[in-house]
Each structure stands twice: as C-alpha cells, then as structure tokens.
C-alpha cells in the first residue's frame, strides 16, 4: 500500500511549495524539495536486496475497478533501476538547482512544482503495470516537461521549444494509447504482466503488428529517435537543471523503458527487431554526425543525447534476437540487453555531469557559444576535470565506464552478422559499419565539447561575465556523478549483480528464472587483437585525426541545404499548413460572432438527433397513460408561450430579459406540478441569478443596431429555432411513448437508503452514484468562472489600467 | 454609484441572513429532502446578489472580503480530496462512507463523507457565481 502511494509523494510535496516560497523566503525553496528525492532514494534502496534476488514486489491501489484500471506499483529489476535513477539523479539535480536558480529573481515555487510533478509522473511511468495508468503518467511527463521547457515563458524560444516538444511527444503518446487499447483487446487485460504471460498467443493476432508500430511510435517520439529527435535540441531552452534531468537521465529514457518493458511481448516479431535496431542505429549515426555542426554547448549535448539514446535503442533491438536463437549464439544476444542496461546507467552518470558542467560554464561566463569560449581550464579546474571525465567516458575511453559499455555495444553489433534469420545475414553487415562510423563521430564531438571549451586560446576578456570557478554547492552534484563514472569502471560486476542482471531478467523473462543465470562478467580487457579492440583503436586513431583537422572539414556542414531539414518540415506543417491554409479554411466559418456559433451548434444538434430518430425508427407517439390536462396547466402554457414570443419580439433588451425570466419561472412551476421539487428549486434560483447577471452585463452589451431594432425576420435563425423546438418535442414524445427498458429509478429507490444512506435520490445520485460526473462538472464550472475572470481582467490590464 | 435607499438596505440586511440560513438548512437537508450543495450554493449566491442590489459592489466587498477564486480552489480541493480519501484506505476512488453516531444535542445523526464532497460543490458554486457576477459587475 505504502509502496504505491510513494509515487504520489512528490505530487503531495508540490502542494506545499507555494507556501514554502512565499512564507519561508529566507531559505531557498530547493532545500525543502531536496528532502523528497532523498527520501525516495533511501526508500527504493531498501528494495534492492529483494529485487536483486530476482523477485518482484507489487502493490496495488484500485482506481476504477469496474473498468480494470488501477494504480499499480510493480517493482522488478527494470522498474527499480529506473526508480533509483529518477530519484537519485533527481536529488543531485535539485541540489544543483539550488545554486543555479536565484532565490530572489526566479519563480521558484512554479519551477519546483513542475519538477516534482514530473518526478511523480516518471515514477508512475516506470512502475505502472496497468497500461491505462501508464499512459496517464506518460502524458503527465509531457505536460510537466512542457511547463519546464517553457519555464522562462517570456522568451520566444522557450515557448517555441515547449510547444514543439509537446506537439511531438503528445502525438506519439496518442499513438501509444491506440497500441495499448489494441493490446488490451487482444489480451483482454490492461496488465502488462498478464500480457507478457500470453505473449505467444498475442503474436498470432492480426492486430499485433499495428499495436507494435503504434507503441513504437510512442517510444520513439519520447526517446527522440530519428526522425522525431527535432524537439530535443529546441528543448534546451529549459533551465540547465531541467536539461540535465529530463533530457539526459529520465524523460527521454521513458521511451527506452517502454521498449525494454514490451520486448517480451513483441520480440517474437521480425518487424520489431528491424525497426528498433534500425531506427536506433540511424539515430546514433545522425545525432553524432550533426552534433559537430552545433555551436551551443547544450546543443552539442542534445545531439549527443539523441545519438546515445539511439545506441541504447539499437542494443535493445539486438537483444530481442535472443528469442530466436539457441545455444552459443543465444548468449551473444543476451549480452546486448545487458549492454543496453549498462549503457543506460553509464549514460545517466556522464551525461548528467556534462549537462551540469555546460550549465556552470553558462552561469559563470554568460555564454554557451563554443566559438566564444576557450582557455577556461586554468580558471575552472574542477569543472574542467569533471568535463574531461564525462567526455572521455562518452567517447568510450578507459578507465571510464563508457568504455565498458561501448565495447559491449561493438560486440553486439559485430555478432548481428551471424544471425541468419530475417535477412540479417545479408543486410546485417551494414550494422557494425554504421556503428563504427557513429562511434568515430561520438569520439570527435566528445573531444570537441571539452577541448574547445576549456583549452586553446583564452578570449576571457571578451566573455559577458568575468569567468571564475563555480561555487562549491554547484560543483557537488557534477563531481559526485563524475566520481561515479570512474567508480563504475572499476566495479562493473558489483553493479551488474545488484542492478543490471535483475533488469535483464525483466527484459528477457522467458530466458531466465533467476538473475544468477545471466552469466555475464564485465571485464575491461577482453583479450588481444579481438575485432572489438581493433575497432576501438581505429576509432581513436581516426577520431584524433579528424578532431585535429576539424577546422578544415567542418565547412562540410554548410554544404547541407538548409531548406531540406526536418525542422523546416515541422515548421512547414505547423506554421504554413496548419496556421495558414487550414486556418484560412476555418476562418470561413469561425467568424467570431457568438450568435452564429450558437446557430451552428444548435442546428447541428437538431439535425443529428432528428436524423437519428428517424433512421433508427425510434419515433413514436402514443398518448397511453398520459395524465389529464388541467385548466391551470393550460393557463400556465399560455403564459409560457406569451413569454417566449415576447422574448423574441421584444423591442428592447430589458424587456427580453424580463420575458425570459418569466419563461424560466413558469417552467419551474411545471416542475413543482410534476413532483420534482429539487429541479424546481434549482430552476428558481438559477433564474433569479441569471436575471441579475443579465442586468449586470446589460451595461456592456453592444447597442442594438438600427436594422436589428426592427427585429428583422431572419430565415436561418427562425429555421434553427424551429428545428430545435421540433427536436425537443419529438424526443420528449418518443421517450414518453416507448418504454423499452424498465425505469432505472426503481434501482435507485431500492438502494438509495441501503447503499448510500440517503433519502433524496437526486442528491444521492449527484454526490454518490454519479460523483465522478459532478466532480468534473464543478471542474468545468470553475474553469468557466476563471476564464470569465481572466477574459475581463486581462482586457482591462491590456488597456494599461491597473487590476 | 452610491444609492441611498434606506428601506431596501435595511430589509436586505435582515433578509440576507434569512436566505443564508435557509441555504445552510437546505444544504444539510439535501441528503434526505430536496436541496444539496448545488442549490444551497446558488441560494447563498442569490443572498449575496441581494446585498449587491441593495448596496453596491464595493460596499459588499468590504462587508464580505472574500476572494472567490480561492473559494473555488478550496471547493475543488475539498471535493477531490474527499473522492481521493477512500483510496488511502484501500477502497476504490470515490467510495463514500457513512455511519450513525450519537451526538450531543442532535441525538442520533448520520454522518456522510458525501456531505464533505457536497460542501466542495457548494463552495465551487458560490465561488464561481460570485466570481462571474463580481468581474462582470466591476468591469466599467
């Protein structure tokens, strides 16, 4: 129970942030936030002994049990690893942000609310076993990252980046939802565990491939795979702690997580292996190649993240091959899944530290443009050391953890040529070649990042700020991560036993029954003259040559036609296609006249309802069981009709309003007559208030135009109003004339006292039976109220008046 | 715009309380007889509207210095909190609880969590209605 509630702890903490920010303003709000991830790290660490034995812990909280939707915290090797990364890196990022964001100048409460919201969402994504709640949390990560990227919302670029990332990831999320729904139709459950258990049957379904592609679209958009990566570089407009957290360690890895989680279900399929491996490798190459085109430090890191995510993705694809082979070959492909998880951990450590260093450089020098930077080594020695460690690890050099996983990656790519199923024996040879070229570029951009910034001719006096080493507090987090980079190199097998093997078991559950069976030892030295070693030496040699001659061939990037980029395609779709062309079309009917909209709405409703009535042959009139009409009812109806006619033909607005009030009161009298006191009461009060409201708004309404004063007869409007009247009458008559099902009120009459302990059915339905409905209704009501408030107040302030 | 209508102002002062207590009554009675949070909220709002009609917006704001937007937020939080509360006891979202208690003075009374939810509805309705009326009325 507590385990599943832990997902919501960050969200609960977020509620108190405005209080901390406004009342306790002598202490940086970040210190209060820091408690949350630290607590979570410690809490999740207590699960490590259990999980590393290969067990899984599950805790469930029913949400909508009738639909099978519940919050589930399912902790196995994979989700525990991710939870620890989220909370662990989260703690370091919060610590870093305390020094990065100024207490007096920034809207800290907003920042930390978004960050905590995001933390909750990520924990939810990786722990949810129920696909519907997984989707819920998935979109919450999109929303919170939108808010975080657009945090400096007065900058155009921030808003642009936030919109772009949301457009792409939410579109992918929708696709993924479709995939989830298809899967649940096939397997008749929302639970991923149960779906995995019936994976072989699922593969025979017709919908299988569709679901596969849809879910992959969700994963690819989130993990910034080619061609969806274009949002990630623009997302760099976010504050650096956000970039370090969302765009290196957590959010972008949600897609990786999803692919890993669904591997047991989809690995049967050839398409899965080709798509995941192929897209991953293409992204790896593309990202590493274009990283060298960037001038912005965070831009370089963004492209390197894209490329590294591609690497992990391709490893997961290769790992899926293990389902199709047997014997000695199987171990090779099992190796790939192991390498994927290993590289995931390594990437979180070195990329997190590199992002923080980029932020420090930006913070202390005032620029992130690599052309202006240089020679900072002697001024910022600690930052330089950490950057060097991170970059060398990224480049795949010993003695840093990136080297180990890089070697495993090369092994996996080499072994793919031996796989003789699905045409891999012929086309497979491309894979190690692409992987090698991409690795060369990875090597170059890693060097480019660190040496162009910290060595060379110092143009220190030209920088916006006079550079100096960052304060100690800001350095703590990158130094810890940098230290981890080295530590992981020397104790890879400890990490493997505790974290990686249980996670691999979660990815390949059919192949193992306990983590010990994942018999893989990581060793830094894998023997003389193995192909991998040769490849690494080649990478270093070619990489060094190309790096030293960088200024000569970097012009190559200018040869690419700047018009034919994916970014331009995106801009074209969003701004040209949607805004201009489709906008022009919608401008034809969206004229801004509310009266016209009202006729559209009412007209279409009556057309649809009347057409349905006749198509379904549902129209029927019988007067059986109709109660006798009394004289006073006829009088009331005459009053009602007169009121209605007066509303329409009144010469002035005020007469119309009063006549409308008359209609309302008469209707409420009818409610009284037909034993609906609740409705009558509500109707009466609503009438009173709406008349008061009309009179208040009366002052602001535009004057009747000359021709309108004559209440010109308008054919269109008369037609719409007659249609609406006819529709309501027809529906009422038909509903009265045929009783296909027994009335539901019997059920309420019987249960209202025993189940809900109430006497008034209407109210019990409102607050109990259909409480969800009411909850959303008051939410809508609140939004409407706030919208009116905003509309009127904002209009005032734009005129330059004070609120 | 200052009005100085003594009779209507004097009456409004008294009638306001009558309407308000009536609103409280139908709010609590709602579970067994006609009424409830929605109607109760509307009646309360109409009582405040009466005050606005008798005096004017500025005066009423000084008499009842309530930020109606906060009231809406409180109502939503209360409603959502009541609905979510049952989850902490292991029951599905939106499970209501009720039981009978012997309270001093009132005697045997049934207490519902549904009433708390209804109170949320009440606050939202009063808040939204008054926000709308106030913003439109203030807008010169």
Image: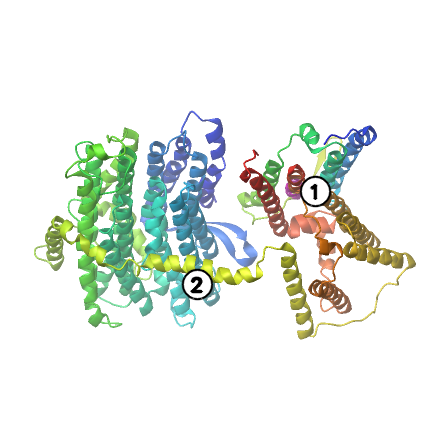
Numbered mark located on residue A647 in the image: none
Q: Position of residue A416 (x, y in %)?
A: 21, 65
- Image side of residue A211 versus residue A768, left or right: left
Contact, mark 1 vs mark 2 (Cβ under 8 Å): no
- Image side of residue A747 versus residue A446, left or right: right
The answer to whether residue A124 is seen in the rendering is no
Q: Is mark 1 on a helix, strand or loop?
A: loop
What residue range appears in magenta?
B114-124
Instruction: Give the labeled residue for mark 1.
Output: A699
Colour style of the rendered protein structure: rainbow
Q: Residue at x 41, y 31 (%)?
A: A105
Q: Position of residue A66 (x, y in %)?
A: 57, 57
Q: Where is residue A153 in the image (x, y as percent from the top left)?
A: 43, 42
Q: How far apart are labels 1 and 2 at the CA level?
A: 54 Å
Q: Residue furthest right?
A: A631
Instruction: Give the labeled residue for mark 2.
Output: A179
Q: Does residue A728 belong to the magenta stretch? A: no
Q: Does residue B119 belong to the magenta stretch? A: yes
- Image side of residue B101 versus residue A274, left or right: right
The chain identifier of the residue carrying mark 2 reads: A
* Label 2: how many Cα within 10 Å (few below 14, some 14–19, many 20+): many
* Label 1: how many Cα within 10 Å (few below 14, some 14–19, many 20+): few
Asked whether B68 or A746 is in front, the reply is: B68
The chain identifier of the residue carrying mark 1 reads: A
Q: Where A686 falls versus A626 (above or below)?
A: above
Which numbered mark, 1 or 2, is in the foreground of this view? 1
Q: Where is residue A131 in the image (x, y as percent from the top left)?
A: 45, 57
């Amino acid at each position: 129970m507590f385990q599943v509630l832990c997902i919501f702890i960050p969200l609960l903490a977020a509620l108190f942030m405005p209080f901390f920010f406004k009342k306790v303003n002598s202490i940086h709000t970040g210190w209060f936030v820091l408690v949350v991830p630290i607590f979570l790290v410690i809490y999740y660490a207590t699960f490590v002994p259990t999980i590393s034995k290969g067990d899984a812990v599950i805790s469930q909280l029913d949400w909508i049990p009738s639909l099978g939707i519940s919050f589930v915290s399912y902790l196995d090797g994979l989700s525990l690893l991710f939870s620890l990364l989220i909370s662990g890196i989260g703690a370091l990022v919060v610590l870093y942000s305390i020094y990065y964001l100024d207490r007096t100048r920034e809207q800290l409460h907003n920042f930390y609310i978004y960050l905590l919201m995001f933390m909750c969402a990520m924990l939810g994504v990786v722990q949810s076993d129920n696909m519907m709640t997984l989707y819920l949390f998935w979109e919450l990560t999109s929303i919170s990252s939108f808010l975080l990227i657009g945090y400096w919302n007065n900058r155009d670029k921030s808003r642009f980046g936030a919109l772009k990332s949301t457009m792409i990831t939410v579109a992918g999320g929708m696709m993924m939802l479709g995939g989830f729904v298809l899967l649940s139709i096939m397997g008749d459950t929302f639970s991923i565990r149960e779906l995995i258990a019936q994976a072989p049957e699922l593969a025979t379904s017709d919908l299988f491939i569709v679901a596969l592609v849809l879910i992959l679209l969700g994963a690819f958009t989130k993990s910034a795979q080619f061609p969806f990566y274009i949002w990630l570089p623009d997302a760099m407009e976010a504050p650096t702690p956000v970039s370090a957290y969302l765009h290196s360690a957590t959010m972008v890895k949600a897609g990786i997580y999803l692919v890993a989680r669904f591997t047991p279900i989809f690995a049967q399929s050839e398409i899965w292996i080709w798509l995941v491996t192929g897209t991953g490798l293409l992204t790896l190459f593309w990202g590493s190649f274009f990283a060298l085109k960037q001038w912005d430090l965070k831009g370089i890191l963004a492209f390197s993240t894209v490329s590294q995510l591609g690497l992990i993705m391709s490893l997961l694809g290769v790992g899926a091959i293990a389902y199709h082979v047997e014997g000695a070959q199987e171990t090779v492909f099992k190796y790939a899944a192991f390498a994927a998880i290993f590289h995931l951990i390594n990437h979180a450590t070195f990329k997190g530290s590199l992002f923080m260093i980029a932020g420090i450089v930006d913070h202390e020098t005032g620029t992130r443009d690599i052309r202006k930077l240089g020679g900072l080594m002697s001024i910022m020695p600690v930052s330089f050391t950490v950057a060097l460690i991170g970059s060398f690890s990224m480049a795949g050099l010993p003695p840093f953890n990136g080297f180990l996983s890089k070697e495993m990656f090369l092994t996996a790519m080499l072994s793919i040529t031996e796989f003789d199923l699905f045409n891999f024996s012929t086309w497979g040879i491309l894979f190690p070649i692409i992987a090698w070229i991409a690795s060369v570029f990875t090597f170059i951009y890693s060097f480019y990042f660190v040496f162009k910034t910290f060595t060379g001719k110092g143009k220190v006096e030209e920088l916006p700020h006079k550079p100096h080493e960052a304060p100690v507090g800001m350095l703590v987090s990158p130094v810890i991560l940098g230290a981890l980079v080295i530590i992981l190199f020397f104790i890879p097998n400890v990490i493997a036993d505790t974290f990686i093997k249980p996670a691999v078991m979660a990815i390949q559950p059919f192949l193992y029954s306990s983590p010990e069976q994942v018999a893989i030892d990581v060793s830094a030295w894998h023997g003389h003259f193995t192909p991998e070693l040769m490849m690494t030496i080649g990478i270093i040699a070619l990489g060094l040559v190309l790096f030293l001659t960088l200024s000569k061939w970097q012009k190559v990037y200018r040869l690419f036609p700047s018009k034919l980029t994916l970014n331009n395609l995106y801009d074209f779709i969003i701004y040209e296609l949607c805004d201009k062309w489709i906008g022009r079309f919608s401008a034809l009917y969206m004229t801004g006249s509310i009266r016209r909209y009202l006729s559209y709405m009412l007209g279409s409703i009556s057309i649809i309802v009347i057409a349905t009535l006749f198509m379904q042959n549902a129209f029927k009139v019988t007067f059986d069981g109709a109660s006798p009409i009394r004289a006073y009812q006829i009088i009331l109806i005459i009053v009602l009709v007169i009121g209605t006619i007066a509303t329409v033909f009144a010469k002035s607005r005020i007469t119309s309003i009063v006549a409308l009030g008359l209609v309302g009161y008469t209707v409420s009298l009818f409610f009284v007559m037909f034993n609906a006191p609740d409705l009558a009461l509500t109707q009466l009060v609503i009438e009173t208030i709406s008349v008061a409201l009309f009179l208040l708004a009366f002052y602001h309404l535009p004057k009747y135009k000359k021709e309108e004063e004559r209440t010109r007869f308008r054919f269109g409007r008369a037609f719409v109003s007659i249609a609406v009247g006819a529709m309501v009458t027809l529906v009422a008559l038909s509903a009265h004339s045929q009783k296909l099902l027994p009335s539901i009120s019997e059920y309420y009459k019987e249960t209202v006292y025993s189940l809900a302990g109430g006497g008034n059915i209407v109210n019990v339905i409102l607050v109990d039976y259909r409480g969800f409905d009411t909850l959303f209704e008051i939410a809508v009501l609140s939004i409407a109220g706030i919208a009116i408030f905003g509309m009127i107040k904002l209009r005032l302030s734009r005129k330059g008046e004070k609120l | 715009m200052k009005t100085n209508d003594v009779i209507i102002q004097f009456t409004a002062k008294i009638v306001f309380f009558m309407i308000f207590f009536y609103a409280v009554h139908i709010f609590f009675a709602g579970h067994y007889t006609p009424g409830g949070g929605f109607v109760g909220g509307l009646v309360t709002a109409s009582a405040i509207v009466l005050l606005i009609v008798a005096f004017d917006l500025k005066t009423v704001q000084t008499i009842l210095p309530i930020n109606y937007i906060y009231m809406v937020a409180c109502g939503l939080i209360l409603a959502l909190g009541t609905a979510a509360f049952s989850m902490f006891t292991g029951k599905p979202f939106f499970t209501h609880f009720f039981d009978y208690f012997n309270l001093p003075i009132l005697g045997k009374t049934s207490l519902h969590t549904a009433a708390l939810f209804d109170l949320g509805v009440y606050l939202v309705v009063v808040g939204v209605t008054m926000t709308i009326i106030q913003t439109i009325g203030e807008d010169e």
